[in-house]
Image: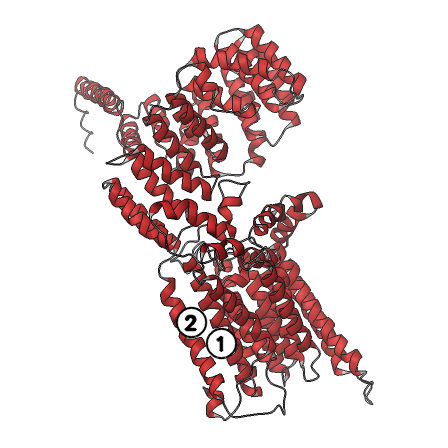
Amino acid sequence: WGARLQGERLPLPLLAAVPGLAAAFCLFQLVPLPTPLLGVLSPEARDLREFALLPLGLSRLRPISLEPAQTWRELAKHLAYLSVLVTAAQLSRSRRVRRRLLMASALAGTAVAVIGLGHLLAGATTFFGVYTFEGLPPVITPFGNPNHLAGYLILTSTVGLGLALSASDRQRALVWAVAYVAMGAVALLSLSRGGIAFFVFGQVLFAALLFRRKAAKGAPVHATGRRPPWLRLSGAAFTGVMAVLAVGAYVAFDRIWAELETADSFDKLRQSKMDLYPMIAGAAKHFWVAGMGRGAFEVGFNRFQTEQASMTFTHPENLVLQLAAELGLVAAVGLLGLALWGLTRLLRRETMGVKDFAVLAAALACGLHNLFDFNLELPACALTVSVLLGTSSRPEEGAARGAWTGPRWAAVCGTAGLAVLALFAAGGSAADAEASLRALAAKRPPASEVRKLGVSLIDRHPADYLLYDWVGLAFATGPGADPGQALAFVNRALYLRPLDTDAHRVAARSLARAGKRTQALLELRLAAETSPDPGPVLVEGIDLARGVFEERRLVGSEPAALRDLITRVRWRGRPADAEALLAGALEETRDRKDTEGLWLLAAELRLSRHDYEGALAACDESDKRKAGSLAQALMRAQVLRSMGKREDAISLLRTLVVANPADVGLAFTLAQGYLDGGKFGAAREALARIQPFIRSLDQRADLFVFQGTAFSREGRYALALQAFQSAARLQPGRAGHQYLIAQMYEALSKYPEAIQAIRAGDRLEGGSKTAPAWIAKLEGLEQKRTEANDQKLLEQGPPAPAPED
């Protein structure tokens, strides 16, 4: 509109084609297509329609996108980025306005940095004392994700350095230099390994671009003998990088080094997010033609996830894989190639200045950072990049200016109208749909009502497996239960996410209700294998199983899984089954070398039967498979102590403590052995040696409890009382500490104080069955003592009067 009022042709930079084409691809992915054409462009979308939607009566034509609502949002976002970039290019015809845009970006980054430093200095753990992030970031800013914070500061700090180097006077240069150091320091304090690496890369690239321009111009040395200005600016840029690194190292060297040490080898790097790239690339191969839909990765990837079942991946954390999966291979290559071409053309401009080089260095560093992150998927970084690239994509000075034409005006109006339409078409998100269906299911209405709402939400979010889960759960456990309907819905959920633990459990319950216990046990086994915590699933299966044969069906042949099953069978009050399962497991895995855990379990079971020789033999078998294990040594010490060989057990524990001086639990075990043997001084010495290795308040509280126990067994009740009171101060919510304090007061005949401690523990525990009787006993003792004192005073009679002078 401003260009039209000024009689100028609206600039359309080459880089504007990147968000423009991305928006066009989004729009194409939202067009409902005939089934044959959909099968050619996206076989996965066609299969989803035929398998999951048609049986539910949802027969309308479907688009390529697996999550149309999110693709509509992405369309609106890309149109916004396009509009911002073109607007910034138009405004940047004016040098004054261009500088304002760059200053606004740098000031926003400075504000973020100041907020972070302020929270850091105040030792705050909440954002302005109001909001608590789910995972406490290293430095608290409006960004909850430290990687996104680092990506944003890469952009703004580099621009701040450009403003400092291009300032017209020293005072302004100093102000921007201070702002740059603050932003750079917070970027380092974010502890984002990729962010730190690409922050440094961006600054070095900026300095290199300045030096390259100087070399290309071949500027001679001034007559005054001063270095050429481009060389001076390159040196200043390198000096700025060194200043930021020095400040960061001084402020938080230990924290930064500890974070960087986690990636100090290739093996450690391979254990990071890059290990997931082959799995994500395999998923992208299924959508190489036209993608799964922009923004649909969170729901579309679930079907191809084969690792980390407890995790939901919202982004691949790799820009190339993100675009390849969501838009298809051709579109991804085209957009990335177009972006590189546009940046290259900007670099070749003769009119590029210091601030332009800062913008390009920042954009390139942020783009490369997104090979390991996804901050460009969120508006903070994406909009900032659009503004910055718009300032450098301004029309060349002296470029032709022409009047507006009808097609350009229509294009602008169409873009604005389409953006508004996209926002309305997006409607609610998948998370909103899940929340509304979950809220209805929690009220336990008839399953038919849950189905009605669920089908309407599935129509808008066809690839969201959780919607099928909730409807299936309603048919499995709610009023109007129907095992057949439950299985139909959970089968669709498992089609969309094979690692869905909840769907396997719902299927198991439905099969069990239908009388198909064998199949139900198989579903529970699959649920246990995909669950991060298989314990509750195994307990459910053990309760359903009848006999050892069916219990064995719940796990595979891995020794760790077998040991977990046997332990839980034992806990459920089936010791005979546990013994039989263990004997079968040892026979089944007799040729394997990783069965030391099973043999330790055998030692534990034999010890519980007082078969000490058998327990020692099992320890020997475990040691043959993995020698030197701490768990093996502890089990052997426990067997020796049970056999009455207390000194041998303590000698073994002492050897372990020497080899593992920082193991707090081992030191407590040794101290307990000394206490049981009546060696109170040795127990206190063992506890004193472990004090430098105490790392948490819970461990320190346990230390005080051990010390108090040692003092109480010696009859030194006052010292024991002090130790228990120290433990209570560290863990004020533990009722047991108050009861220990009460015992010491009782031993010291301080019955009112003991009663007060018992009542405090009773409040913390929410009601104790033994507290009233204990209090009554102490009240009786206090009453007897009071009566005895009164009787003693009566027997003594009144005191004799004092003689008069």
The reply to whether callout 2 and callout 1 are in contact (CB within 8 Å) is yes
Mark 1 surroundings within 10 Å by alpha-carbon count, few (fewer than 14), some (14 through 19), many (20 or more): many
Q: Position of residue 688 (x, y in %)?
A: 56, 30
| Quadrant location, the C terminus | top left
User: Mark 2 — residue?
Assistant: 419
User: Which SS class for mark 1?
Assistant: helix
Tell me the quarter of the picture where residue 794 sits. top left
Q: Residue at x 62, y 17 (%)?
A: 622
Asked whether 754 or 489 is in front, the reply is: 489
Asked whether 628 or 351 is in front, the reply is: 351
User: Mark 1 — residue?
Assistant: 83
- The CA distance from mark 2 to mark 1 is 10 Å
Q: In the displayed structure, would residue 591 be above or below residue 315?
A: above
Mark 2 or 1, closer to the camera: 2
Which of the marked residues, 2 or 1, is nearer the chain's N terminus?
1
Question: Going by the image, does 382 lie left or right of 158?
Answer: left
Question: Going by the image, does 417 lie left or right of 532?
Answer: left
Asked whether 508 or 32 is in front, the reply is: 32
Q: Position of residue 679 (x, y in %)?
A: 53, 17
Q: In the displayed structure, would residue 20 be above or below residue 650?
A: below
